[in-house]
Amino acid sequence: MHWKEKVRILEQQDDFDVAIFFLERVIKEHPEDVDAYIFILFRLMDTIVEHACHFSNVSQTPVSDIKKEYYDSKEDYYESLARKYFKEGYAKFSENADFLFYVGITAVMSEWYFGIDRKDYEKMLDEAGGIDPDNLIYKYLYYRDLDQTIVNNKREAVEYANIVLSENSLIKKALINKGAVGEYWLGILTYWSKEMLGLPIK
Amino acid sequence: MIQYGYVVSPTLKACCRYDDYAVYVDDAHLERVSQQWKLYEYENFRQFLRKLPDYDRYISGAYDYVQKNPRTQHKFSREAYCYLSSEYYTIKKRQELQERQLQQEKLAKEQHQREQEALQQERAQQQVIQTTYQEHAEEIDHEQGDWHEPCDVYGHYGLGDGVRLEKRIDALREINNSGAVYTRTQHNLDAAVAQLLQLSGYNEGDYKSCYGNQLQQVVHGECLDILGHVASPATPLIIEKDVVVDCVDAVREYNQSGLVHKACQVADMCWSMLDHSRAVLADIASRVAVHSPDVISHVAAGVQEIVLHPAQYIDAVGDGIGKGLYCAVTDIFNHPVQTVAYAVAGQYILEYHLSKVFFDLCNISIMALLDRDRARKKWDDYIVTLTTVINAITAKKTTLREAIENGTAFAVAWKAQGKLLDGMGNLYRSVKDKALEWIRNNPLADPERYMMTSDGRLMQAANNVHFEPLKDVPHGSSQKVLQFSEEAIEASVRWAMHDNKIDHIFKNVGHKLEPLLEKMNCDKEQLVSEVIRELVANHILPIKDKFEDFPIHFAGYTIHVRGIVHEGIVKLGTFFIP
């Protein structure tokens, strides 16, 4: 079983700490695998910032309060890991578009846990677009920021929203390969696309 | 020529006589000839063997053979047997002696090596201490700002604490003017202090000597002074001794690792714990005599009343004071002015130092849980608050342990931090236990009555720490509560209204914000603005740190918010409706 599949199973079962433990091992065994860094950095950030929401609104576990308390207590430790892996990953992959993009969108949640500030992650996102300007996934930032009052812009954005929501969208396929961060980004793209097309969110 | 079946080679190297025959032995046959036991009968052979380098081995071999084969013994003459055994034991003794000498030399060498290593290690440690101190020199100067004002106040009222602060200021001045002088100084330990350390499970050796500069020596002296007070039966201590000793040991650890600014903060808290007990007594004394015309005579009359009826007032101040009460009462009687000063400042100073330690050193910030006006009538709110603090301390200890397990360059600092958290945890547990016990014994009494006792006063101080940590602190060097201006609030809203941040907060179905957004006509900026304003108005935010899951109530919804205060504004991380 591929390590990404194992991570997916662990995350589905709310075993975020085991997933982090396992991803650390993946990094040790495959130190040049950019996805391993993207996965662990998202897992750490999401666990720190969103665990309270997850155990309140998403998780089905009957012991969510205990789990929430447990992850509260791990925050400082995860923060130290997040800083460590960000520094390490950035040193290795600062010219890799995927690293810059996915870690950049992860940093948006609370960039201070990576020890950076807003202009740092904005630079990362800009650079990712610069390295791979045709990447459909990165292009969301472009369409989102278009002035929608201009007819042509609106048309371009609607086309993009349709691509996002289409059944066999290339975007969906590509994002599935990026695990939880892909799922997170697909959620945002879908929300925006539905808003753009005037569809109900749920 | 053939003797005993050995062919003597033409290249002869040695010979001896056997009966009338000459025995010629070459190197190749020495081993086998040496095992011809009959030859040992002959002095010539023995003399021949003695010249050989393996003589000891040959003799040992022959003797062993005789011992293992008793039948051969009678073939030896008495003289030859005596020769063999005497030589054997002489050789043994010599070998043992040599072995002993070798062993001693080895031990001496190892000891020397160990000493050298220890010396090197100590030098390296000393270097680390000096570097750590230098790296934090600015923080010590900053901390010094907090020493001057109390020093003046104490000086004005003639309170003892001023002296220790003056000593610190003098030592720091000396370091700044003439440079730091690092020495290892020996300190004498009072028998009562040694016993107190032993009972608390601490190593008295750690207190007998201290390596450090002038300021570190002063702080080490303070540790011993505090322990002296705690060990003395004359000290009225309403805080558990173990709590103070844990904290003093944290002071020592911080101090001896070079983190003197932290050591001073914890030491100040320990002093304030001692002062607090005195303050409580003074307050009780002042309540005893209600008819006195002015404050000083009010206290004095109260004290006189306690002196006359001590047993009656032991109940009033609660457990844990015992004999110390009498001494304290006499002291209060003799120093009424100082007593008033303590009564006014004691609790306030304890709250101030507890706050500093919690926020600066333990890095623990907890949202206000208690509506104090309501809490006067409700036990649960007090107990929940104490439990929350205990949980926060326990959580800190867990992450601290993990940090140590994952290796850290500041192992000593972590150790000190761990001891401090132990002390703070024990303080809160003890406050909670005492309160619960009192409730059990007085089921119909309300919190207000408990607050009249010494333990209740301690609980009040422990509670107050978290609500207004350093608000209204007269000396502003480490003011911790930000007053957010309108500009700061607006800047916080602008910061949050960034496209990427808005995506994260609002385009996340799990945050369940849609109903609230609908209620607000999808005005995200308005919602963000309201969230920040509620947050600033209803929570004590740290000056420069993260805040987590603060609940705010808005438009009929409870929203959980987390983020950071940085560069003077609130930076939202996320928020959601549970």
Image (spheres, rainbow, N blue to C red):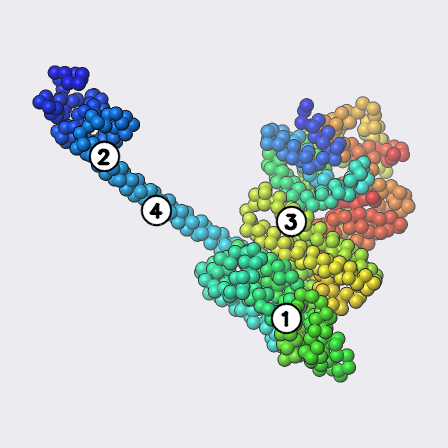
In whole angstroms, how far apart are the C-alphas of marks 3 and 4? 43 Å
Contact (CB < 8 A) between labels 3 and 1?
Answer: no
Q: Which residue is mark 2?
A: B85
Of mark 3 and mark 4, the one earlier in the sequence is 4
Q: Nearer the viewer, mark 2 or mark 1?
A: 2
Label 3 Cα crowd, 10 Å radius (few <14 / some 14-19 / many 20+)? many
Q: Say what secondary structure mark 3 lies in.
A: helix
Q: Say what secondary structure mark 2 lies in.
A: helix
In whole angstroms, how far apart are the C-alphas of marks 2 and 4? 34 Å
Q: Chain of mark 4?
A: B
Q: Quadrant of the C terminus of chain B?
A: top right
In whole angstroms, how far apart are the C-alphas of marks 3 and 1? 36 Å
Residue appearing at x 54%, y 65% in the figure: B192
Amino acid type for the residue under numbered disc 3: Lys
Closer to us: B342 or A120: B342
Residue B98 visible in the snapshot: no
Of mark 1 and mark 4, the one earlier in the sequence is 4
Res B108 label: 4
Q: Which residue is mark 1?
A: B323
Label 2 Cα crowd, 10 Å radius (few <14 / some 14-19 / many 20+)? some
Q: Residue B285 occupies which quadrant of the picture?
A: bottom right
